[in-house]
Image (cartoon, rainbow, N blue to C red):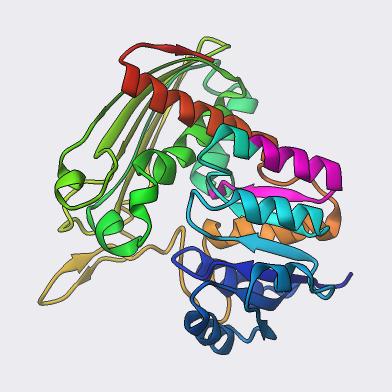
Amino acid sequence: MTKLRVGVVGTGLFGERHLQTYSTYFRSELYGIFDINLERAQDMKEKYGAKKVYRNLEEILGDSQIDAISIATPDNLHRDIAVAAAKAGKHILVEKPLSTDKIEAKEIVDAVAENSVVAMVDFHNRINPQFTLIKDSLANGEIGDLKYMYFRLSNTLAVPLSMLSWSGNSSALWFLGSHVVDLGRWLCNSEVKRISAVSRSGVLNSRGLDCPDFYVSTLEFENGTVGVFENSWILPSTQPTVKDFLAEIVGEKGAFYVDGANNRTVQKYTSEKYMFPDLFAVNINPRCPSGFVFESIRYFVDAVLDSKQPLATVEDGFENTRILCGIEEAAKGGTAVDL
């Protein structure tokens, strides 16, 4: 196999990132596209040079020319596609979270194991240079044992109200919390044993969305590390970036502080607004998209072609889903949850 021939399922916000990557990476070929919006799928075929558009999931999974499937559907619609793809013998890249349901997540894990396909969950912050630096430093003992972590990853109202058509079937916890909870588990190299959490609703409810405005969660890990995680979907839309991403990583001999959103390498001011263009995570260069979001997808291609360990396995995805379900349970019940 000289190139990985990929079919992409879902062409929305992140699905287009997959299309951009496979159509420009020299080790992959964007072979086919399936989206329930056939008109959009046709537009994306023309834009990125895919060979085919499929009318249904069965068609794309049944095409022997396709080696792998990228799943970029809404958060709650991964299970059926992933299980069917595994049974069809296709390698799988699935957007985070693996699933919003523990039983469905376990079904994906089992299907991958039973059919011996390569599967990766797209936790792209595992290749984010800001955090790979911290991971290596922790491994080298530079700040001693990890004691405390704080993460804030939140969005402006524009994300649930405008950017995502399916936000009512997700939440700030699933869309954003999945990233930082995975980062915490990965950096800590330990499993979560106890969860406390609080959420509040009202702002999004008043806009017609049935999901909480924010979650604040405290996770206690088996090795003694404590992590606090904040995720909100109600930041003001006047902010210069749609996300606010901060981290504090404290060890016994030192600390790291990360600002993952307010990168001022380039500042753009017009008569109407100002912004800080994202050149770090997502830089849309038409010849070769750059940034760790794209690097994660390219990593999946390399993992299949070179038989190497994915950045995040479906087992990692299952643990992530299990933790997020625990956060929801703790927030609803008002008491700590033991995993």
* 121 in the magenta segment: yes
* 55 in the magenta segment: no
Q: Residue at x 20, y 52 (%)?
A: 208
On the rendered image, what quadrant is the N terminus found in? bottom right
Q: Position of residue 82 (x, y in %)?
A: 67, 52
Q: Residue at x 51, y 70 (%)?
A: 11
Q: Residue at x 25, y 58 (%)?
A: 161
- Residue 215 left/right relative to 294: left
Work out which residue is located at the far left of the displayed protein and give it.
271
Q: Please indicate, yes or no, whether residue 197 appears anywhere in the rendered image.
A: no
Q: Residue at x 58, y 44 (%)?
A: 98
Q: Position of residue 108 (x, y in %)?
A: 69, 43
Q: Position of residue 214 (x, y in %)?
A: 27, 36
Q: Nearer the viewer, residue 38 or 14?
A: 38
Q: Please indicate, yes or no, whether residue 4 appears anywhere in the rendered image.
A: yes
The magenta segment? 106-124
* For residue 297, above or below residue 39: above
Q: Position of residue 213 (x, y in %)?
A: 24, 40
